[in-house]
Image: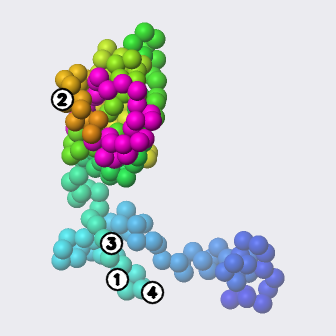
């Protein structure tokens, strides 16, 4: 095998002499399970998931079927990822289109998620710039922990509905912080997560 010959850095890790490295390693390492799946040399388990036979470990069973059998759409996966991140976040970034400039403007804001409804409360009420922007251009983007989505803003001006959103913010962030950071409670914004 040539193990007594001097070894250089590439072959030292496996204890094989350089002149024998390529020849001996070529057939000794079995392909990975994912390589076998791509090559089509796998068997199906009774539950339909692929099972790859490896000579040194027996059967390697993958926890889910290959992508071709997986029926979830990318849009559904993104929606679930966004909901998951929203449920774990205290703050999100929204991207609105400037009503005068037409530029995309990103702002970190607080929010309350309730089912499929995202509740937003402008810090200065109807005087808040991002609020004025979504009144003119209702489509806006959100980002929460790396997950992104595109939503449509629905301005809320009814005093009773605004009060309901304010109460939700007080429950999530505390009465003192809402009082500390929010100056005017005349409007709110709601958006449905599609």
Q: In the image, what residue occupies the spot 45% across and 71% down?
A: 32
- Whether residue 170 sits left or right of residue 27 in the image: it is left
Q: Of the residues under marks 4 and 3, which one precedes in the sequence?
A: 4
Give the Cα separation between the discs numbered 2 and 3. 53 Å
Q: Quadrant of residue 189?
A: top left
Q: Secondary structure at mark 1?
A: strand
What residue is shown with label 1? 59
State yes or no: residue 173 in magenta: yes
Label 4 CA crowd tier, 10 Å (few <14, some 14–19, many 20+): few
Earlier in the chain: of badge 4 and badge 2, it is 4
Towards the viewer: 139 or 182? 182
Location of mark 3 (residue):
62
Left or right: residue 99 versus residue 4 is: left
- Find numbered disc 2 in the image and state the secondary structure of the residue it sits on: helix
Q: Nearer the viewer, mark 4 or mark 3?
A: 3
Give the residue number, with chain letter if any, for mark 4. 56
Establish if 1 lies above or below 37.
Answer: below
Name the one closer to the observer, 5 or 177: 177
Q: Are marks 3 and 1 in contact (CB under 8 Å)?
A: no
How much space separates mark 4 and mark 3, taking CA atoms?
17 Å
Q: Secondary structure at mark 3?
A: loop
Q: Quadrant of residue 28?
A: bottom right
Q: Which residues are magenta?
A: 168-194
Residue 72 magenta-highlighted: no
Query: In this rendering, which labeled residue sits more in front, label 3 or label 1?
Result: 3
Q: Residues within 10 Å of mark 1 (few under 14, many from 20)?
A: few
Q: Secondary structure at mark 4?
A: loop
* Vertical relation: 187 (above or below) 16: above
Q: Is residue 175 left or right of residue 20?
A: left
């Amino acid at each position: 095998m040539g193990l007594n010959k001097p070894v250089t850095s590439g072959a030292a890790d496996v204890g094989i002499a350089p002149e024998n490295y390529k020849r001996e390693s070529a057939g000794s390492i079995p392909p990975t399970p994912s390589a076998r799946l791509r090559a089509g040399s796998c068997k199906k388990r009774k539950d339909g998931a692929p099972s790859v036979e490896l000579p040194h470990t027996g059967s390697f069973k993958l926890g889910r079927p290959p992508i071709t059998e997986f029926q979830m759409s990318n849009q559904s996966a993104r929606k679930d990822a966004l909901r998951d991140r929203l449920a774990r976040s205290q703050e999100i970034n929204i991207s609105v289109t400037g009503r005068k400039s037409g530029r995309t403007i990103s702002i970190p804001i607080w929010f309350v998620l309730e089912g499929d409804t995202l509740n937003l409360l402008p810090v200065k009420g109807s005087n808040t710039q991002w609020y004025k922007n979504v009144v003119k251009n209702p489509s806006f983007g959100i980002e929460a922990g790396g997950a992104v989505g595109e939503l449509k803003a629905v301005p809320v001006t009814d005093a009773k509905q605004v009060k309901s959103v304010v109460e939700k913010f007080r429950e999530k962030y505390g009465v003192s912080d809402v009082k500390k950071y929010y100056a005017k409670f005349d409007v709110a914004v709601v958006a449905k997560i599609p």
